[in-house]
Amino acid sequence: MVMKSHLILLLLVGCMLSLVLDGAIAEKVLKPKPKPKHKLTTIMGNAAWMYPNSQEDIPILVKQVQKFNAGAGAEHKLKTIFVYGGALPFDGKKFVPDALLHASIQAFQKAKIPGLTIHVNLDANLNQDGSPILKMSNRKLDALVNKVAAYICKDPLIAGIHLDLEPFGEPFTKQLTHIFATMSSNLRNKHTGCRNRVHPKGRVMSVYVENASVAVFKALGPNGVLVWPGYDCTVKPTSVEAYSRAFRKNMMRKLLNVLKHVPNGRFMVAVPAAATQTEFAYTVVQGHSKSFRSSGKHQFAKKGASYITSAVQNVHKLARNHPGYNGMVLWKLAAYYTIGANDERLGPGGAFDVAGEEAWLQENL
Protein backbone atom coordinates (compact mmCIF):
# COMPACT_ATOMS: atom_id res chain seq x y z
CA MET A 1 0.00 0.00 0.00
CA VAL A 2 2.83 2.34 0.89
CA MET A 3 4.64 1.42 -2.32
CA LYS A 4 1.51 2.19 -4.35
CA SER A 5 1.14 5.56 -2.64
CA HIS A 6 4.76 6.41 -3.47
CA LEU A 7 4.20 5.46 -7.09
CA ILE A 8 1.09 7.62 -7.31
CA LEU A 9 2.97 10.53 -5.71
CA LEU A 10 5.87 10.15 -8.11
CA LEU A 11 3.49 10.07 -11.06
CA LEU A 12 1.76 13.23 -9.85
CA VAL A 13 5.09 15.02 -9.37
CA GLY A 14 6.23 13.89 -12.81
CA CYS A 15 3.06 15.18 -14.42
CA MET A 16 3.41 18.53 -12.67
CA LEU A 17 7.04 18.85 -13.75
CA SER A 18 6.07 17.94 -17.28
CA LEU A 19 3.38 20.62 -17.33
CA VAL A 20 5.77 23.23 -15.95
CA LEU A 21 8.49 22.33 -18.44
CA ASP A 22 6.03 22.21 -21.34
CA GLY A 23 4.70 25.61 -20.34
CA ALA A 24 8.21 27.05 -20.10
CA ILE A 25 9.14 25.62 -23.48
CA ALA A 26 5.90 26.86 -25.02
CA GLU A 27 6.46 30.30 -23.54
CA LYS A 28 10.00 30.30 -24.90
CA VAL A 29 8.78 29.26 -28.33
CA LEU A 30 5.70 31.48 -28.50
CA LYS A 31 7.09 34.57 -26.80
CA PRO A 32 8.08 37.00 -29.59
CA LYS A 33 11.70 38.00 -29.72
CA PRO A 34 12.34 41.64 -28.86
CA LYS A 35 12.94 43.79 -31.91
CA PRO A 36 16.58 44.81 -32.29
CA LYS A 37 17.21 48.39 -31.29
CA HIS A 38 18.26 50.72 -34.08
CA LYS A 39 21.84 51.83 -33.78
CA LEU A 40 22.47 55.49 -34.51
CA THR A 41 24.38 55.83 -37.75
CA THR A 42 26.13 59.04 -36.84
CA ILE A 43 28.88 60.02 -39.27
CA MET A 44 29.11 63.68 -38.31
CA GLY A 45 27.75 64.50 -34.85
CA ASN A 46 26.84 67.99 -33.64
CA ALA A 47 28.11 70.71 -35.96
CA ALA A 48 28.34 74.48 -36.48
CA TRP A 49 28.67 76.79 -39.45
CA MET A 50 31.72 79.06 -39.35
CA TYR A 51 31.95 82.36 -41.23
CA PRO A 52 35.18 84.29 -40.60
CA ASN A 53 35.15 87.77 -42.08
CA SER A 54 38.86 88.45 -41.66
CA GLN A 55 42.13 86.71 -40.83
CA GLU A 56 41.77 88.04 -37.27
CA ASP A 57 38.44 86.23 -36.84
CA ILE A 58 39.92 82.77 -37.38
CA PRO A 59 41.79 82.27 -34.07
CA ILE A 60 38.84 83.78 -32.19
CA LEU A 61 36.39 81.29 -33.68
CA VAL A 62 38.75 78.32 -33.30
CA LYS A 63 39.13 79.19 -29.62
CA GLN A 64 35.34 79.30 -29.30
CA VAL A 65 35.17 75.69 -30.48
CA GLN A 66 38.01 74.67 -28.16
CA LYS A 67 36.33 76.32 -25.19
CA PHE A 68 32.92 74.86 -25.98
CA ASN A 69 34.19 71.30 -26.38
CA ALA A 70 36.38 71.53 -23.28
CA GLY A 71 33.30 72.21 -21.16
CA ALA A 72 30.77 70.01 -22.97
CA GLY A 73 29.80 66.45 -22.16
CA ALA A 74 30.84 63.75 -24.63
CA GLU A 75 27.48 63.64 -26.43
CA HIS A 76 27.16 67.43 -26.56
CA LYS A 77 30.53 68.34 -28.13
CA LEU A 78 30.89 69.78 -31.61
CA LYS A 79 32.20 67.07 -33.95
CA THR A 80 32.03 68.91 -37.28
CA ILE A 81 32.65 72.48 -38.44
CA PHE A 82 31.26 73.71 -41.77
CA VAL A 83 33.94 76.24 -42.77
CA TYR A 84 32.83 78.64 -45.48
CA GLY A 85 34.62 77.73 -48.70
CA GLY A 86 33.08 79.88 -51.43
CA ALA A 87 30.26 79.87 -53.98
CA LEU A 88 29.60 77.38 -56.76
CA PRO A 89 29.76 79.27 -60.08
CA PHE A 90 26.93 78.45 -62.48
CA ASP A 91 27.94 81.11 -64.98
CA GLY A 92 30.81 79.19 -66.56
CA LYS A 93 33.50 80.81 -64.46
CA LYS A 94 36.18 78.88 -62.57
CA PHE A 95 35.51 77.90 -58.96
CA VAL A 96 37.45 80.19 -56.64
CA PRO A 97 37.71 79.11 -52.98
CA ASP A 98 37.12 81.65 -50.25
CA ALA A 99 40.30 83.53 -49.36
CA LEU A 100 40.11 82.41 -45.71
CA LEU A 101 39.30 78.73 -46.31
CA HIS A 102 42.74 77.16 -46.11
CA ALA A 103 43.87 79.43 -43.27
CA SER A 104 40.83 78.30 -41.29
CA ILE A 105 41.56 74.62 -41.96
CA GLN A 106 45.19 75.02 -40.94
CA ALA A 107 44.16 76.81 -37.75
CA PHE A 108 41.96 73.88 -36.72
CA GLN A 109 44.74 71.44 -37.61
CA LYS A 110 47.14 73.36 -35.37
CA ALA A 111 44.58 73.48 -32.54
CA LYS A 112 44.27 69.65 -32.55
CA ILE A 113 40.75 69.56 -31.10
CA PRO A 114 40.04 65.86 -30.37
CA GLY A 115 37.43 64.21 -32.58
CA LEU A 116 36.73 67.33 -34.68
CA THR A 117 36.33 67.10 -38.47
CA ILE A 118 36.30 69.93 -41.00
CA HIS A 119 33.84 70.14 -43.90
CA VAL A 120 33.87 72.79 -46.62
CA ASN A 121 30.64 74.77 -46.93
CA LEU A 122 29.85 75.76 -50.53
CA ASP A 123 26.88 77.99 -51.23
CA ALA A 124 24.98 79.74 -54.03
CA ASN A 125 22.12 82.20 -53.97
CA LEU A 126 19.87 80.89 -56.71
CA ASN A 127 17.44 83.77 -56.37
CA GLN A 128 20.20 86.02 -57.65
CA ASP A 129 22.04 83.79 -60.11
CA GLY A 130 19.40 81.18 -60.82
CA SER A 131 19.12 81.72 -64.55
CA PRO A 132 22.53 80.21 -65.42
CA ILE A 133 21.90 76.91 -63.62
CA LEU A 134 18.60 76.45 -65.45
CA LYS A 135 20.46 76.69 -68.76
CA MET A 136 23.17 74.17 -67.82
CA SER A 137 22.99 70.62 -69.15
CA ASN A 138 23.68 67.65 -66.88
CA ARG A 139 27.00 67.27 -68.64
CA LYS A 140 28.05 70.82 -67.71
CA LEU A 141 26.79 70.41 -64.15
CA ASP A 142 28.80 67.19 -63.83
CA ALA A 143 31.94 68.87 -65.15
CA LEU A 144 31.63 71.64 -62.54
CA VAL A 145 30.97 69.22 -59.67
CA ASN A 146 33.82 66.94 -60.74
CA LYS A 147 36.33 69.80 -60.71
CA VAL A 148 35.15 71.11 -57.33
CA ALA A 149 35.23 67.66 -55.74
CA ALA A 150 38.72 66.97 -57.07
CA TYR A 151 39.96 70.34 -55.79
CA ILE A 152 38.47 69.92 -52.30
CA CYS A 153 39.62 66.32 -51.95
CA LYS A 154 43.26 67.27 -52.59
CA ASP A 155 43.38 68.36 -48.95
CA PRO A 156 43.47 65.32 -46.62
CA LEU A 157 42.34 67.54 -43.72
CA ILE A 158 38.92 68.02 -45.34
CA ALA A 159 36.50 65.28 -44.25
CA GLY A 160 33.49 66.34 -46.28
CA ILE A 161 31.54 68.89 -48.30
CA HIS A 162 28.41 70.77 -47.22
CA LEU A 163 26.22 72.21 -49.99
CA ASP A 164 24.05 75.19 -49.07
CA LEU A 165 22.34 75.86 -52.40
CA GLU A 166 19.22 77.92 -51.77
CA PRO A 167 16.37 77.88 -52.29
CA PHE A 168 15.83 74.15 -52.76
CA GLY A 169 12.59 74.16 -54.72
CA GLU A 170 11.15 74.84 -58.15
CA PRO A 171 12.42 75.64 -60.68
CA PHE A 172 15.78 74.39 -59.34
CA THR A 173 14.82 71.01 -57.85
CA LYS A 174 15.86 68.87 -60.81
CA GLN A 175 19.27 70.51 -61.23
CA LEU A 176 20.09 70.54 -57.51
CA THR A 177 19.10 66.90 -57.02
CA HIS A 178 21.37 66.00 -59.93
CA ILE A 179 24.23 67.97 -58.35
CA PHE A 180 23.71 66.14 -55.04
CA ALA A 181 23.86 62.73 -56.73
CA THR A 182 26.98 63.58 -58.75
CA MET A 183 28.81 65.08 -55.77
CA SER A 184 27.86 62.13 -53.57
CA SER A 185 29.26 59.69 -56.13
CA ASN A 186 32.48 61.69 -56.48
CA LEU A 187 33.05 61.82 -52.74
CA ARG A 188 32.93 58.01 -52.53
CA ASN A 189 35.24 57.29 -55.46
CA LYS A 190 38.98 57.11 -56.05
CA HIS A 191 39.12 58.88 -59.41
CA THR A 192 38.65 62.29 -57.77
CA GLY A 193 41.01 61.43 -54.93
CA CYS A 194 38.16 61.59 -52.41
CA ARG A 195 38.52 57.96 -51.35
CA ASN A 196 42.08 57.09 -50.39
CA ARG A 197 44.23 55.69 -47.59
CA VAL A 198 43.39 58.58 -45.26
CA HIS A 199 39.69 58.43 -46.13
CA PRO A 200 39.04 54.75 -46.98
CA LYS A 201 35.26 55.26 -47.17
CA GLY A 202 35.49 58.56 -49.01
CA ARG A 203 34.30 61.95 -47.76
CA VAL A 204 30.99 62.81 -46.15
CA MET A 205 28.37 64.89 -47.93
CA SER A 206 25.68 67.04 -46.35
CA VAL A 207 23.09 69.34 -47.91
CA TYR A 208 20.95 72.16 -46.56
CA VAL A 209 17.39 71.35 -47.63
CA GLU A 210 14.22 72.82 -46.15
CA ASN A 211 11.82 70.57 -48.08
CA ALA A 212 13.10 67.02 -47.77
CA SER A 213 12.06 64.37 -50.29
CA VAL A 214 12.68 60.71 -51.01
CA ALA A 215 14.56 61.74 -54.17
CA VAL A 216 16.98 63.93 -52.19
CA PHE A 217 17.75 61.20 -49.65
CA LYS A 218 18.33 58.77 -52.51
CA ALA A 219 20.70 61.23 -54.21
CA LEU A 220 22.76 61.65 -51.01
CA GLY A 221 23.87 58.02 -51.00
CA PRO A 222 25.42 56.11 -48.07
CA ASN A 223 27.77 58.95 -47.05
CA GLY A 224 25.07 61.62 -47.14
CA VAL A 225 23.23 63.61 -44.47
CA LEU A 226 20.38 66.08 -44.93
CA VAL A 227 20.51 69.23 -42.77
CA TRP A 228 17.02 70.52 -42.08
CA PRO A 229 16.80 74.17 -40.90
CA GLY A 230 14.83 74.67 -37.71
CA TYR A 231 14.93 78.43 -38.07
CA ASP A 232 13.18 80.93 -40.34
CA CYS A 233 10.06 78.80 -39.74
CA THR A 234 7.90 81.93 -39.77
CA VAL A 235 7.66 84.72 -42.33
CA LYS A 236 8.44 87.51 -39.86
CA PRO A 237 9.71 88.01 -36.31
CA THR A 238 7.29 86.40 -33.89
CA SER A 239 6.89 85.20 -30.32
CA VAL A 240 8.86 82.25 -28.96
CA GLU A 241 5.65 80.25 -28.55
CA ALA A 242 4.53 80.85 -32.15
CA TYR A 243 8.01 80.03 -33.43
CA SER A 244 8.08 76.79 -31.42
CA ARG A 245 4.72 75.69 -32.84
CA ALA A 246 5.89 76.46 -36.38
CA PHE A 247 9.14 74.56 -35.72
CA ARG A 248 7.30 71.39 -34.67
CA LYS A 249 4.77 71.59 -37.49
CA ASN A 250 7.41 72.18 -40.17
CA MET A 251 9.75 69.46 -38.90
CA MET A 252 6.95 66.89 -38.91
CA ARG A 253 5.63 67.87 -42.34
CA LYS A 254 8.86 68.67 -44.17
CA LEU A 255 11.23 66.11 -42.63
CA LEU A 256 9.98 63.40 -40.27
CA ASN A 257 6.97 62.37 -42.37
CA VAL A 258 9.27 62.02 -45.39
CA LEU A 259 11.67 59.83 -43.39
CA LYS A 260 8.88 57.27 -42.91
CA HIS A 261 9.52 56.35 -46.55
CA VAL A 262 13.33 56.41 -46.28
CA PRO A 263 14.45 53.75 -43.75
CA ASN A 264 18.15 54.58 -44.13
CA GLY A 265 17.84 58.36 -44.35
CA ARG A 266 20.19 60.35 -42.14
CA PHE A 267 19.55 63.89 -41.02
CA MET A 268 20.57 66.75 -38.75
CA VAL A 269 18.54 69.69 -37.45
CA ALA A 270 19.92 73.23 -37.55
CA VAL A 271 18.94 75.41 -34.58
CA PRO A 272 19.05 79.23 -34.24
CA ALA A 273 21.86 79.89 -31.79
CA ALA A 274 22.45 83.36 -33.25
CA ALA A 275 20.54 86.03 -35.13
CA THR A 276 18.48 85.01 -38.16
CA GLN A 277 16.16 86.94 -40.45
CA THR A 278 13.00 86.09 -38.56
CA GLU A 279 13.92 84.93 -35.07
CA PHE A 280 14.58 87.60 -32.42
CA ALA A 281 14.88 90.43 -34.97
CA TYR A 282 13.21 93.82 -34.97
CA THR A 283 13.31 96.78 -37.37
CA VAL A 284 15.09 100.05 -36.68
CA VAL A 285 15.33 103.12 -38.87
CA GLN A 286 18.76 104.10 -40.18
CA GLY A 287 18.35 107.43 -41.93
CA HIS A 288 15.83 107.02 -44.73
CA SER A 289 16.19 103.22 -44.95
CA LYS A 290 15.23 100.38 -42.65
CA SER A 291 17.61 97.63 -41.55
CA PHE A 292 17.16 94.53 -39.43
CA ARG A 293 18.74 94.78 -36.06
CA SER A 294 18.92 91.75 -33.78
CA SER A 295 18.25 91.66 -30.08
CA GLY A 296 19.31 88.91 -27.70
CA LYS A 297 16.18 89.42 -25.62
CA HIS A 298 14.47 86.18 -26.64
CA GLN A 299 17.43 84.27 -28.06
CA PHE A 300 18.36 82.56 -24.81
CA ALA A 301 16.80 82.51 -21.37
CA LYS A 302 17.87 80.15 -18.60
CA LYS A 303 14.38 80.48 -17.15
CA GLY A 304 11.33 80.87 -19.31
CA ALA A 305 10.89 80.51 -23.06
CA SER A 306 13.58 81.37 -25.59
CA TYR A 307 14.24 80.53 -29.23
CA ILE A 308 17.30 78.33 -28.79
CA THR A 309 16.01 76.39 -25.76
CA SER A 310 12.65 75.67 -27.39
CA ALA A 311 14.35 74.56 -30.62
CA VAL A 312 16.72 72.15 -28.84
CA GLN A 313 13.91 70.78 -26.68
CA ASN A 314 11.75 70.18 -29.76
CA VAL A 315 14.60 68.22 -31.36
CA HIS A 316 14.97 66.11 -28.21
CA LYS A 317 11.25 65.32 -28.15
CA LEU A 318 10.62 64.67 -31.83
CA ALA A 319 13.87 63.65 -33.52
CA ARG A 320 16.63 62.56 -31.16
CA ASN A 321 15.50 58.92 -30.90
CA HIS A 322 15.05 58.49 -34.65
CA PRO A 323 17.56 55.93 -36.02
CA GLY A 324 18.72 58.39 -38.69
CA TYR A 325 19.38 61.29 -36.32
CA ASN A 326 22.96 62.59 -36.58
CA GLY A 327 22.95 65.66 -34.34
CA MET A 328 22.21 69.39 -34.35
CA VAL A 329 23.88 72.21 -36.27
CA LEU A 330 24.43 75.60 -34.65
CA TRP A 331 23.77 78.73 -36.64
CA LYS A 332 26.51 79.99 -36.33
CA LEU A 333 30.15 80.88 -35.46
CA ALA A 334 30.83 84.41 -36.67
CA ALA A 335 32.07 87.83 -35.64
CA TYR A 336 29.44 90.37 -34.63
CA TYR A 337 27.49 92.30 -37.23
CA THR A 338 28.16 95.99 -37.88
CA ILE A 339 26.16 98.72 -39.54
CA GLY A 340 26.95 102.24 -40.71
CA ALA A 341 30.20 104.12 -40.28
CA ASN A 342 30.35 103.89 -36.50
CA ASP A 343 30.54 100.06 -36.34
CA GLU A 344 27.42 99.84 -34.19
CA ARG A 345 27.02 96.25 -33.07
CA LEU A 346 24.02 94.34 -34.37
CA GLY A 347 24.46 91.21 -32.28
CA PRO A 348 23.97 88.50 -31.41
CA GLY A 349 25.83 87.43 -34.52
CA GLY A 350 27.61 84.40 -33.06
CA ALA A 351 26.37 81.26 -31.35
CA PHE A 352 27.79 82.18 -27.95
CA ASP A 353 27.14 85.94 -27.86
CA VAL A 354 24.45 85.90 -25.16
CA ALA A 355 25.46 85.29 -21.54
CA GLY A 356 24.63 81.78 -20.36
CA GLU A 357 23.82 80.33 -23.79
CA GLU A 358 27.14 78.53 -24.25
CA ALA A 359 26.95 76.82 -20.84
CA TRP A 360 23.37 75.70 -21.52
CA LEU A 361 24.30 74.24 -24.91
CA GLN A 362 27.27 72.41 -23.38
CA GLU A 363 24.74 70.42 -21.35
CA ASN A 364 21.85 70.19 -23.80
CA LEU A 365 23.01 70.25 -27.45
Image (cartoon, rainbow, N blue to C red):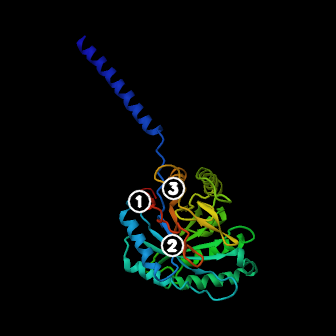
Residue 151 in the image: state x and y as whole percent: 54, 86
Find numbered disc 3 in the image and state the secondary structure of the residue it sits on.
helix
Res. 334 mark: 2
Residue shown at 48%/72% (left/top)? 81
The one nearer the camera, 250 or 6, is 250
Question: Which amino acid does the dot numbered 1 rest on?
Answer: Ala
For label 1, count other residues whose C-alpha is less than 10 Å away and answer few (under 14), some (14-19) or many (20+). some
Q: Which residue is mark 3?
A: 312
Find numbered disc 1 in the image and state the secondary structure of the residue it sits on.
helix
The answer to whether residue 116 is above or below residue 193 is: above
Question: Which amino acid does the dot numbered 3 rest on?
Answer: Val
Q: Give the distance between the C-alpha atoms of the residues marked 1 and 3, in whole angstroms.
A: 14 Å
Q: Which residue is mark 1?
A: 359
Quadrant of the rendered image containing residue 23: top left
Residue 90 in the image: state x and y as whole percent: 68, 82
Question: Which amino acid does the dot numbered 2 rest on?
Answer: Ala
The one nearer the camera, 217 or 157, is 157
The answer to whether residue 255 is above or below residue 7 is: below
Quadrant of the rendered image containing residue 344: bottom right
